[in-house]
Amino acid sequence: MKLLRHEAEDGPSVLLFGLGLIGGAVDRALRLRCGAGAMHFPYDWRDGPLRAAQRQAILAALPPADRVAVVWTGGQSGFASTDADMARETALVAELVAMAEGLAQAGRQVDFHLMSSAGGLFESQTQCTAASRPHPLRPYGEGKCRQEETLARAIGLGRRCVYRPSSVYGVTRSRRVGLVTALISNAVRGGTTRIFGNPHTLRDYVLADDIGRYMAGRILEPGGAGPVETMLLASGRAASVFEVIERIRERMDRPLLLQFDPHPSNVRDMSFLPSALPADWQATSLVSGIAGIAIFFRSGSA
C-alpha cells in the first residue's frame, strides 16, 4: 500500500490500498494533482496478525492533524472467484473500515472510498439507469454487494464513496489488464489472446486513467458526513467483443491471433445509459483509448 501526503496544509493524507490497474491510475492522478509525497508500506493480504501489525505501522506514520482518506482499490477477485475468495476479500475491506472508524473516534475527519464493480453487480442487465438495482449472478457480485453494505454500516466517517466501474482497461504492471490492453499488447508482441465469451457479447469499456482522475478529484475534495455516494463509471456506449477486435485490428494494421474459449461462462450482455453516469464524469471514447494504449506499447514503454 501507499501513503500519500498532500503538499497543501488542508489536504488529506491518502491511504491507498491496492496499486493494480485502477489503484495505479489513482496513484498517478493524485501525484499529478497535488504533488503528493509518498511512503510505501508492506501489506500482507493473507496473514491476519502480520497485517494488523502493518496497519499499526501505517497509522503511526500519519501526521497528527491531517484529514485522512482511506481508499480501497485492492483485491484479486474476478468473475471466477468463489464464495471463499470473496469472503476473504470482504474481510480485508471490513478491517479497513474498522480502522477508519477508529481514526474517526480519535477525532480525525476520515473519508472512505471503495472500489466496487458494475460488472459484478449488473451482469446480464442492459440499459441500466441510476435506479437499476444490482442482481448479482456470481459470488463475485455478491461479495461486492457485501463490501458496499459494510461501508454503509460504518459509523462516524465523513464522506463515503462507492465507485462501480464497468469493464476497465488500461496500462498497468499487474497481470490483470483487461481485454483491450491484452489484445493490443499481444498484437505488438505476436502473442495469442484468449477470448472468454462470444464475439457478440456487449460490454461497456472504460479507461482506468479516467477512473483515476475522477477518484482523485473526489478524494481531494472536502466533504462532510452524509449518505453513501454511489457512482457508476462507464462510457454509456456498449461495444461488442467483435467491435473491439475490429477497432484494434484497424489501429494496429495487422492480424490478431485469437483463441475463443469453447465453453465460455462470461457471455451475458451489459450496458448502461449515459443518464446513469455522474454529471461531472467524462469518459474517453473507445477509439481514443485504443489509440493511446497502442502508442504506449509501440513506443516500447511497456
Image: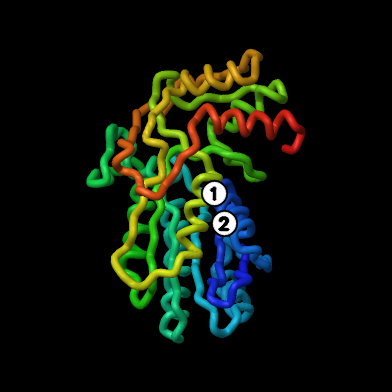
> Splitting the image into 4 quarters, where does residue 3 fall?
bottom right
> Splitting the image into 4 quarters, where does residue 268 fall?
top left
Callout 1 amino acid: Ile
**236 on left or right of 295:** left
Q: Residue at 48% x, 32% y: name it.
A: 285
Dot 2: element:
loop
Mark number, residue 22? 1
Quickly name the residue at label 2: 18
Q: Residue at 37% x, 72% y: name it.
A: 224
The C terminus, quarter of image? top right
With respect to residue 274, does 55 lie above or below?
A: below
Of badges 2 and 1, nearer the viewer stands 1
Across and down, in percent, residue 210 comes to 51, 45
Give yes or no for contact between labels 2 and 1 (Cβ–Cβ under 8 Å): yes
**282 on left or right of 17:** left
**192 on left or right of 222:** right
Across and down, in percent, residue 54 comes to 61, 73
